[in-house]
Image (cartoon, grey):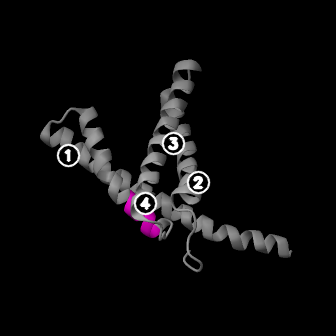
């Protein structure tokens, strides 16, 4: 039973990190959507430009919240910001690739493929942040 207890003792902090990551992601997406809808509906900005603007504005608060709260990282800001941006771009490329594969090559409905891709990229970006962007939380700060 000791082995099982050890496994659960180690996985509980990761589950908490993942829950915080999901909360930050939901908040960042709601913030970005608010900017998008304000820009498109109230100001009349073209949708692709509004999406680019919203993503750019939401990027920094999402990074800051993940650094400070999700991973509680003491990593250098410049280094972690560059890595976060790289990971964000890699996650986006993965999402687009899954959409292309599922819809264009396999003929599946985009509504389902985008959800599958979102699930894959959510886990991918969490692991990338945990292992590379913000590699280790200080002891006792879960």
Q: Estimate how packed mark 2 is, as few (under 14), some (14 to 19) or many (20 or more) residues with alpha carbons within 10 Å.
A: some
**Real-space Cα distance between discs 2 and 1?**
33 Å
Q: Are marks 1 and 3 in contact (CB under 8 Å)?
A: no
- Answer above or below: position of 67 versus 101: below
**Real-space Cα distance between discs 3 and 2?**
14 Å
Quadrant where the N terminus sits is bottom right
Q: Nearer the viewer, mark 2 or mark 4?
A: 2
- Which of the two labelled residues, at mark 4 and mark 1, occupies the earlier sequence position? 4
Residue occupying image coordinates x 48% and y 32%: 96
**Real-space Cα distance between discs 1 and 3?**
24 Å
Q: Estimate how packed mark 3 is, as few (under 14), some (14 to 19) or many (20 or more) residues with alpha carbons within 10 Å.
A: some
Q: Nearer the viewer, mark 4 or mark 1?
A: 4
**Real-space Cα distance between discs 4 and 1?**
21 Å
Rendered location of residue 85, percent (x, y): 42, 49
Q: Nearer the viewer, mark 2 or mark 1?
A: 2
Q: Nearer the viewer, mark 3 or mark 2?
A: 2
Q: Estimate how packed mark 4 is, as few (under 14), some (14 to 19) or many (20 or more) residues with alpha carbons within 10 Å.
A: many
- Answer above or below: position of 90 versus 81: above
The magenta segment is: 63-69
Disc 3 target residue? 118
Rendered location of residue 16, percent (x, y): 57, 68
Q: Are marks 4 and 1 in contact (CB under 8 Å)?
A: no
Q: Secondary structure at mark 3?
A: helix
Q: Secondary structure at mark 4?
A: helix
Disc 1 target residue? 38
- Which of the two labelled residues, at mark 2 and mark 1, occupies the earlier sequence position? 1
Disc 2 target residue? 127
- Which of the two labelled residues, at mark 2 and mark 4, occupies the earlier sequence position? 4
46 relative to 116 in the view: left or right: left
Residue occupying image coordinates x 51% and y 57%: 133
């Amino acid at each position: 039973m000791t082995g099982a207890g050890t496994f659960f003792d180690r996985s509980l902090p990761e589950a908490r990190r993942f829950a915080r990551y999901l909360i930050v992601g939901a908040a960042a997406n709601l913030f970005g959507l608010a900017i998008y809808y304000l820009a498109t509906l109230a100001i009349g900005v073209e949708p692709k430009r509004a999406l680019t603007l919203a993503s750019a504005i939401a990027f920094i608060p999402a990074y800051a919240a993940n650094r400070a709260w999700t991973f509680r990282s003491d990593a250098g800001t410049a280094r972690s910001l560059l890595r976060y941006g790289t990971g964000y771009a890699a996650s986006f490329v993965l999402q687009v690739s899954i959409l292309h594969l599922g819809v264009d090559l396999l003929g599946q409905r985009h509504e389902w493929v985008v959800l599958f891709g979102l699930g894959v990229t959510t886990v991918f970006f969490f692991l990338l942040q945990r292992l590379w962007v913000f590699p280790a939380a200080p002891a006792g700060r879960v």
